[in-house]
Image (cartoon, rainbow, N blue to C red):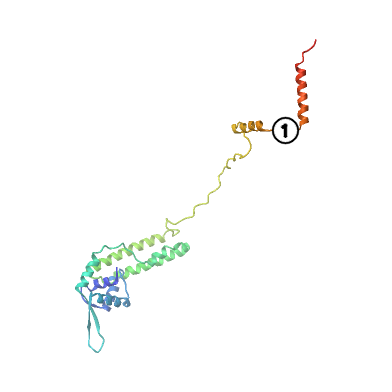
Amino acid sequence: MSLPHVLLGLLWTSPSTGYDLARSLDEDVAPLWRAEISQIYPALARLRRAGFVLLRVLGPRRGPRRNLYRITAAGRRELKRWLSEPSPAPSSKDEGLTRIAFLEALPAPERRALLARYERTIAEEIRRLRDTAPPASFLREARRGAIERLEASRRWVRALAGESTVVPSTAVTTPPERRSPRFPPPARRPTSGFRLGSSAAVIRRSSAARTSPASLRCGPAKACGSSGTGAAKASGSSRSPTRG
């Protein structure tokens, strides 16, 4: 949506001056669209260059003059073309709703005060629109739709201010800290040493017995010899026959 198309819509029924267009925007079209007088005249100049409006100067040669703008046939076709395009979803820069989006920066009492002020602002705008003389044709329907939308926003702000914490239900909360388990964790199994009944331990012990040198099994040579002789004597004495 652009200001030039809004001006073409206002010029559809009758020619107007720049001042009359500004007053119609403020009284008939608002709050659907607002524009200052400093924005209206540059938009009318663009429409003139495009051939969508004509300018006629009224008044005496000496004295104040009035610039009267009238829509052309090309301007009517342009307005019809714009109306036939698909309308986008409603979107606007709403400062009040934008402030509500960041209410977490304020404590609860200040949140409620801000919402109360915003509700009063909406109520004053509704009262102003209802007190103004209703426009003609479909401008009246557009104003009624704007009033109903403001009424819905006012009810929503009032309900939000009535909540205890004034925080939406979708607010992000920090997850609770995970506590340690009640029972201690099971003891870890040893990573070294032998376990009884383990086949791997038996294999390692038998392999060590086969590969170990004799010095490691018997110790010094004298010890091995003495122990060997003693063993032989014991063996011989045990094998000797018993005499009667």
**Left or right of 25, for residue 202:** right
Residue in view at x 43 percent, y 66 percent:
114
**Left or right of 97, for residue 13:** left
Residue in view at x 40 percent, y 67 percent:
117
Q: Position of residue 62 (x, y in %)?
A: 24, 89
Q: Position of residue 79 (x, y in %)?
A: 23, 69
Most extreme residue toward the right is 244
Of 137 and 200, nearer the camera is: 200
In which quadrant is the N terminus drawn? bottom left
* Any part of residue 12 in sight: no
> Count the marks: how many?
1
Q: Which residue is mark 1?
A: 215
Q: Position of residue 92 (x, y in %)?
A: 34, 66
In this view, 114 is above or below 196: below
Most extreme residue toward the top is 244
**Left or right of 119, for residue 236:** right
Q: Secondary structure at mark 1?
A: helix
Of 165 and 8, nearer the camera is: 8
Most extreme residue toward the left is 73
Q: Amino acid at mark 1?
A: Ser
In this view, 108 is above or below 70: above
Residue in view at x 35 percent, y 63 percent:
153
Of 193 and 41, nearer the camera is: 193
Q: Quadrant of residue 218?
A: top right
Q: Quadrant of residue 66?
A: bottom left
Residue in view at x 37 percent, y 68 percent:
121
Q: Quadrant of residue 16?
A: bottom left
10 Å crowding of disc 1: few (<14), some (14-19), many (20+): few
